[in-house]
């Protein structure tokens, strides 16, 4: 299904998720399971078309974006926020180590740097500097709620996907956020960046800004916001959320014996682990997604809100 995704929809999603997005500079965002309607158009505009796609871990089926909140503009790029099947296959023999899928959430620090520094394929990219929640699969090619969860930093950087289109079957990601195109690097003697990656990299590297926050959500979240402009929607809390509602959540988790951290309105590792534990205990291992919506809130005895 196709729909029009506007800058105001992205802004609303950040409000619904209590993401502390800065209003100055550039923000990266990812929408898992959807592609730009026009994969060859990467200009900044107030709105763009999106198409929901099934993730297959073979072709790029996600949208990576750049957002200028002050100007009210977004640019979309085809790519992937999930690992390729090749890396998952290798990881299966290592109990899942070697491939991972980042949880949706808000990540505050992707810095300009070099991906695979010291190698012939090293290229200018954006490096993740902090730990974050990830899943690893050790039994199949899907990342489901009953798969192992970890909090670590396997360096899921932003870099070139090493494929030339969304029809490509060999994008290079073991969990990184990748944009279609090829990088400037020594091997195989690429003289310049090409494809959507060229535009993505240049847009950000032309700025004096060194660190970029990253909003990662599902394409279905974007669709929900786009198709319900005039309706109130229930809030969600997930990794990276920051608001008074997070403190309310922490208090409820603490009361039930699931949370032992500070009451600090910040949905970080301790809160995430507490939510996961609560959901596993109360709903079962297939329902622990780490996202707090109305069902989890009701089970915790929290009066949930709409916006």
Image (cartoon, grey):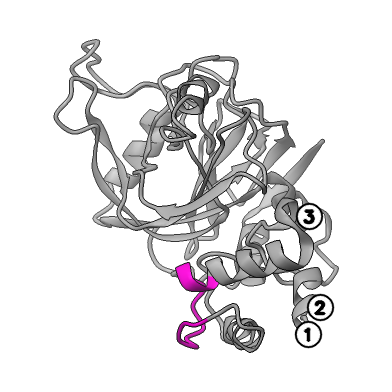
Give whichever of 150, 25 is nearer the camera.
150
Give yes or no for contact between labels 2 and 1 (Cβ–Cβ under 8 Å). yes
Give whichever of 11, 245 is nearer the camera.
245
Indicate whether 195 appears above or below 144.
above
- Left or right, 114 with respect to 52, comes to left
Tell me which numbered mark, 2 or 3, is placed earlier along the sequence: 3
Q: Residue at x 53, y 38 (%)?
A: 81
Task: Say which quarter of the image contains residue 185.
Answer: top left
Give the residue at mark 2: 298
* Place of residue 138 in the rendered image (x, y in percent of width and height, measured from the top left): 55, 33
Give the residue at mark 1: 301
Kind of element beneath mark 2: helix
Q: Give the range drawn in magenta.
A: 260-271
* Place of residue 23 in the rendered image (x, y in percent of width and height, measured from the top left): 45, 69
Q: Count neighbours of disc 2 (C-alpha within 10 A) and say few if under 14, some if 14 to 19, many if 20 or more.
A: few
Kind of element beneath mark 1: loop
- Left or right, 27 with respect to 17, comes to left
* Place of residue 131 in the rendered image (x, y in percent of width and height, measured from the top left): 37, 57
Q: Residue at x 54, y 35 (%)?
A: 82
């Amino acid at each position: 299904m196709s729909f029009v995704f506007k800058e105001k929809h992205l802004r609303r999603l950040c409000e619904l998720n209590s993401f502390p997005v800065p209003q100055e500079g550039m923000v990266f965002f990812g929408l898992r399971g959807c592609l730009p309607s026009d994969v060859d158009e990467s200009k900044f505009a107030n709105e763009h078309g999106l198409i929901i796609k099934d993730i297959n871990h073979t072709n790029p089926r996600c949208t990576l974006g750049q957002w200028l909140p002050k100007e009210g503009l977004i640019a979309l790029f085809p790519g992937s926020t999930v690992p390729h099947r090749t890396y998952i296959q290798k990881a299966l023999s290592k109990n899942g180590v070697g491939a991972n899928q980042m949880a949706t959430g808000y990540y505050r620090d992707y810095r300009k740097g070099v991906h695979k520094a010291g190698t012939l394929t090293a290229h200018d990219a954006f490096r993740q500097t902090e730990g974050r929640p990830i899943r690893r699969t050790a039994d199949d090619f899907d990342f489901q709620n009953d798969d192992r969860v970890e909090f670590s930093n396997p360096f899921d950087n932003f870099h070139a996907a090493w494929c030339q289109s969304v029809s490509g079957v060999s994008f290079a990601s073991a969990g990184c956020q990748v944009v279609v195109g090829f990088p400037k690097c020594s091997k195989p003697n690429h003289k310049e960046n090409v494809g959507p990656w060229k535009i993505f990299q240049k847009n950000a590297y032309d700025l004096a800004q060194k660190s970029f926050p990253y909003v990662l959500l599902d394409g279905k979240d974007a669709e929900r916001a786009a198709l319900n402009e005039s309706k109130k929607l229930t809030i969600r809390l997930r990794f990276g959320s920051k608001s008074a509602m997070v403190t309310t959540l922490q208090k409820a988790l603490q009361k039930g014996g699931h949370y032992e951290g500070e009451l600090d309105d910040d949905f970080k590792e301790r809160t995430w682990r507490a939510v996961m534990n609560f959901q596993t205990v109360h709903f079962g291992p297939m329902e622990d997604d780490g996202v707090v919506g109305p069902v989890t809130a009701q089970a915790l005895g929290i009066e949930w809100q709409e916006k």
